[in-house]
Amino acid sequence: MVKLTHFKGKEKMTKHKSLGQVFTPEWIVEEILDSSGFTNDNLINKKIIDPACGDGAFLKIIVNRIIDFLINKNIPKEKIKEYLENYVYGIEIDEIEFNNCLLNLNKIVKEKLGDNLKVNWKIFKDNTLIRYKEFIGIFDFVVGNPPYIRIHNLDKETRDLLKREFMFVDGTIDIYLSFFELGFKLLNTKGVLGYISPNSYLHNSSYIEFRKYLKEKRAIKRLTDFKANKIFKGFSTYTAITIINFFEKKDNFIYQELKDEKIQEVNKINYDTL
């Protein structure tokens, strides 16, 4: 089955097409967490997962936010350890990046909480397309940078799995679409999803059923289309940040673009006009 992982250095250019992911810039992670509402008091007692966590680009900032907030609230270090063990989740199929993720998170804990605490992380080395079933409906936040792999580049086993498990697999799609659907399944009734992904789902004819679904559910809360701005250096993928929940049911969503190197609101788009 195809590996879905992050790579760095010289490896990333040669492995991007087959393995699906690249590193996410920190400012993108910050933007997604802020737009999703994972800030201040709203990050307490909230379960969060990155379902394709790589070496921990999202989880590092998540853990930093949690530790800093709880330290400021004078929460004992042992309680912070227990909190991290119960509320922070990640899944990564590649062993190298899985181990890098644990190293990165343990480094943060050591620097901020000292050498004596060993966190038993809920970070799993596994295939998300299978493991996610254990976590249906439990997360307040699902965030990340899902794999980008065209469906015709996947092995037959993975293609068959997608067709069995997910709705939006017809046509010339990309696996990131299944990670959207997978993320929806992980959310609880008040959960929020925040992804950076290719923006092809906004206009490609193969994604029309997905667009209809989002419109019917009035699920998008904030959309940032980077258009021709290349967020990942060295890669030609055009991307968008999508913030989704299924409980607000608003008549419109905020539409943003990158202008003058800043994310700026352009307007509010009414669902009835789409």
Image (cartoon, rainbow, N blue to C red):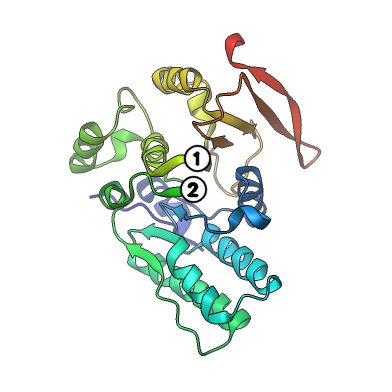
- Between 114 and 92, the one nearer to me in the picture: 114
User: Can residue 26 be seen in the rendering of this structure?
Assistant: yes
Left or right: residue 32 versus residue 188 is: right
Q: Residues within 10 Å of mark 2 (few under 14, many from 20)?
A: many
Q: Residue at x 60, y 23 (%)?
A: 250
Left or right: residue 68 versus residue 123 is: right
Q: Residue 260's spot in the image, x, y percent?
A: 81, 38
Image quadrant assignment for residue 35: top right
Q: Residue 200's spot in the image, x, y percent?
A: 50, 28
Give the Cα distance between marks 1 and 2. Answer: 7 Å
Q: Give the mark nearer the N terminus: 1 vs 2.
A: 2
Please say if 201 is above or below 233. above
Q: Residue 105's spot in the image, x, y percent?
A: 51, 72
Image quadrant assignment for residue 120: bottom left
Please say if 244 is above or below 98. above
Q: Residue at x 28, y 41 (%)?
A: 154
Look at the numbered discs 1 and 2 and tell me whether their residues touch, using CB distance below 8 Å: yes
Residue type indicated by callout 1: Lys
- Mark number, residue 69: none
Q: Residues within 10 Å of mark 1 (few under 14, many from 20)?
A: some
Find disc 1 in the rendering and name its residue: 190
Q: Residue furthest top?
A: 273
- Between 84 and 242, the one nearer to me in the picture: 84
Find disc 2 in the rendering and name its residue: 140
Residue type indicated by callout 2: Asp
Q: Residue 201's spot in the image, x, y percent?
A: 48, 27
At mark 2, the secondary structure is strand
User: Can residue 144 be seen in the rendering of this structure?
Assistant: no
